[in-house]
Every structure is written in C-alpha cells, then in structure tokens.
Image (cartoon, helix red, strand yellow):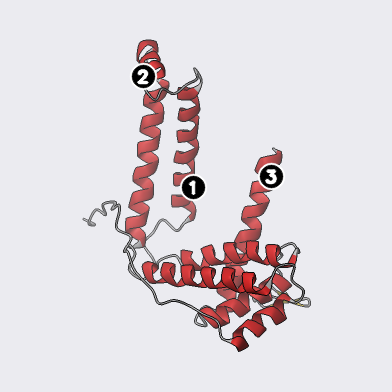
Amino acid sequence: MPRKIRPQYGIDPVQEVSAFSFTDEQRERLFNVLRSVKSNRDDIIAELIKCAGNYIWLRSQNQQKTSRAQQNAVLKELGRLARDLEARLRSLDTDTAWRLMVAPLALNTVDAIPDLADRLDDFAYTAEQALRSGHPKPGPRLQSHVDRAVVKLASLYEAFTGERFSHNPKQRTKYDGQPHSPAGRFIQTFFEIVDPEIRPQALSTAMAGVVKSRRHTRKAATG
C-alpha cells in the first residue's frame, strides 16, 4: 500500500544570500542587448540587481523545497477546504448570516457572503486546475524561480525600452526552441550572467508561458 503524503505548510526555509552585483563588462552586455532604453542606466542596473538577488534567493529556497508529491497534497487539500467552506457559506441560515453582517468588523453588504462563496469557488477551481495541469504524479521540482524571474524580466524589458515583450523560438524560419526576440535575447543574456546553468530552451518555455498567461488575462478582461 503506497504511503500517504500529507500536506505541509509554513516550511519555506529562511535564508540569506550573498549580495549580487554586475561587473562593468556584464553591464555593457546587458545594455547592448537592450539597445535603446528609456530609463536612467543606474536605475536599470539597480532593478536588475534586485531581480538577480531575488532570483538567487528563490533558487536557494527551491533546492530545499517540498517534494512534488507534497505540493500536490497541499493543492488537493486547499481545493477540498475551499469547496467545503463555499458549500457551508451557501447554506447558512438567514439569522446566522445576519449576525455575521452586524458583528464587529462586519462584512458590510448583503452580498458579501455570496461574493465570498464565489471567490472560494474560483480559488478551489484554480487549485484543482493547478493540480491537474502541474503533473499530478510525483516528479522533479518545478523551477518556479526561473518562471518568476522571466515574468519580472518581461515587465522590466517593457519598462526599460518602451517596447512590448514578445517571444520567438525560431531562427528565421527554423524552430530551435531558443529565444530570438529582442526581449528574449535580453533575458537570455541576464541568465548567462546570473545563472549560466539554465538552458536557453528552459527560458524559451518560460517566455512562452508569459505570452500565454497574458493572452488569457486579456481574454478574461474583455469577456
């Protein structure tokens, strides 16, 4: 009988990492791929140092994180708890709901409880989707520190250059799975400096994820 994996909470290790800085040569490499910039160079480097430091901290945490099976157990439990609370809120008797409305730190509006139930429904759905799409079987840890850094770098690229983030995994018409857009070259250069062990194909996958996430956000906003 397989051992049951129990969810664990509050176990992110607290760490300190060494301060990061770019050499003069590395700064020039970054500005060469950024080409024209709208921001002050010192401000740009300060933002990139902050991004690099946060990435290194997250990478160090990821090396000591819970297993995929434990993460899946947490997602499964969160979805179940959210569904359970949603169902209980929707079945409150009117007197109990009213006591919640008039209590100190009250919920303020008559729609507050149904709205909270709707948000719990959304949260439960999100947890269930994360469990289904995130490889529910045990396996290697996700490199979420890479994905987070790419999301941040995509926004920084737009702020630095005034150009829209884009992703192109092709060299002319030939697909090679590596970043070839201007934003992609900037992100790849950043990682060549900060963490050269990350393969270009992994960055390309993360950038494709940014494009997909933004597309879904725009679609949801426009209905």
Q: Nearer the viewer, residue 30 or 148?
A: 30
Residues under numbered marks 3 and 2 in contact, where contact means CB atoms less than 8 Å apart: no
Question: Which quadrant: the N terminus?
Answer: bottom left
Q: Position of residue 72 (x, y in %)?
A: 37, 54
Between marks 3 and 1, how big is the CA–CA gap?
18 Å
Residue plotted at (39% across, 59% down): 137
Q: Are marks 2 and 1 in contact (CB under 8 Å)?
A: no
Q: Type of residue at label 1?
A: Gln
Give me the residue at 22% from left, 56% from top. 3
Query: Residue most toward the top?
Result: 95
Q: Which mark is residue 219?
A: 3
Rendered position, 95 above or below 175: above
Above or below 136: residue 59: below
Residue at the extreme bottom: 25
Quick one: label 2 or label 1, which is nearer the N terminus?
Answer: 2
Q: Secondary structure at mark 1?
A: helix
Give the residue displayed 36% in from the left and 56% down from the top: 71
Q: Which label lies toward us, 3 or 1?
A: 3
Q: Position of residue 16 (x, y in %)?
A: 35, 70
Label 1: which residue? 129
The picture places residue 53, in percent across and down from the top left corner, at: 47, 71
- Is residue 207 among the parts visible in the rendering? yes
Which is in the foreground here, disc 3 or disc 2?
2
Point out the tag, 3 or 1, that comes first from the N-terminus. Answer: 1
Q: Quadrant of residue 101?
A: top left
The residue identified by callout 2 is: 103
The 10 Å Cα crowd at callout 3, few under 14, some 14 to 19, many 20 or more, is few
Is 219 or 14 nearer to us in this picture? 14
Residue type highlighted by circle 3: Lys
Image position, residue 150 (x, y; %) = 58, 66
